[in-house]
Amino acid sequence: MDNFVTRDSPRLTDFSDFVSLMLLSSTDYNHDVASELIKQNVAELLAEISDGVEVVAAAKARTPEEVLEAVQAGIQIIGENYVKEAKAAYELVGKRAKWHFIGTLQKHNVRRKVLEMFDMIETVDSLEIAREIDRKCAQIGKIMPVLIEVNSGREPQKSGVLPEDVEQLIREISNLKNIKVMGLMTMGPRFGNPEGSRPYFAQTRRIFEKIRGLKLPNVEMRYLSMGMTNSYKVALEEGANIIRIGTKIFGQRD
């Protein structure tokens, strides 16, 4: 114990005090290591991608402190899956970053404060949810940029509109005044080999290009959001200009 105690050290009245001090020191050390890892990961990622590609830090299950670390390291957009987690992170980070909603949006979560917080919703997949966003945004004088989520893998457990229905949905949404379609988003099936995602990304790109060529009113096909930590390199090759990255920024979840 002499190795840990100096003349200026606080007096440890019992062994529990000693343990508490060691745990506190360990917590500080772990935080510093995690902070440095996030900083390094962000620097490597931003150096790797081309100009014109936007990185969304997928912050599902991450602490507000981790989100802040990513922003301080250079991340400009935070992607949140859950409204509750987003609110906690937003209280700490605020407008130092832009906020994208990337989870399944339930109708009961389309509330004024939620819409005021987010700068884009990437997961619109029905006229019903689009109408609700439009109605609530009209109340706050906001036009919400949205992406249409495409279920490119036709997976019944996932949300998203089927590829053949994307155009019709966008035509219907284009009539709404307080919502603006800005592009498409897809997840695609998950594969151990990222090459497995390529056909689904390529298909979504073809739909994107077709709709952009239609020049529909109130539709600006600017963004194609595809690819996560395992598949973003393939997504970029297939034309993505938004990638949603979690593990490669924050590390593995506990």
Image (cartoon, rainbow, N blue to C red):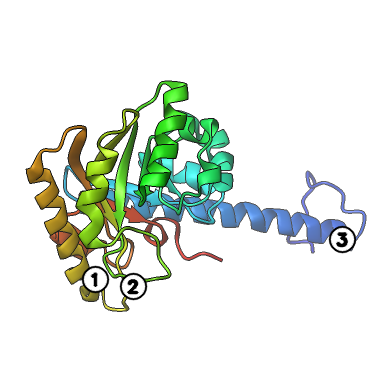
Q: Which residue is mark 2?
A: 190
Quarter of the image that includes the N terminus: bottom right
Q: Which residue is mark 1?
A: 197
Secondary structure beneath dot 1 equals: helix
Using a 10 Å C-alpha cutoff, classify the residue at mark 2 as few (fewer than 14 neighbours), some (14 to 19) or many (20 or more).
few
**Label 3 to label 1: alpha-carbon separation:** 53 Å
Secondary structure beneath dot 3 equals: helix
Is the Cβ of the residue at disc 3 closer than 8 Å to that at disc 1? no
Using a 10 Å C-alpha cutoff, classify the residue at mark 1 as few (fewer than 14 neighbours), some (14 to 19) or many (20 or more).
many
Q: Which residue is mark 3?
A: 16
Using a 10 Å C-alpha cutoff, classify the residue at mark 3 as few (fewer than 14 neighbours), some (14 to 19) or many (20 or more).
few
Q: Amino acid at mark 3?
A: Ser
Identified at 35% across, 58% down, the residue is 160
Residue 230's disc is: none
Is the Cβ of the residue at disc 2 closer than 8 Å to that at disc 1? yes
Is the Cβ of the residue at disc 3 closer than 8 Å to that at disc 2? no
Q: Nearer the viewer, mark 3 or mark 1?
A: 1
Q: Among all residues in the image, which is located at the extreme left?
A: 213
Q: Amino acid at mark 1?
A: Ser
Mark earlier in primary sequence (3, 1): 3
Residues 60 and 125: in front is 125
Secondary structure beneath dot 2 equals: loop
**Label 2 to label 1: alpha-carbon separation:** 7 Å
**Label 3 to label 2: alpha-carbon separation:** 47 Å
Q: Amino acid at mark 2?
A: Arg
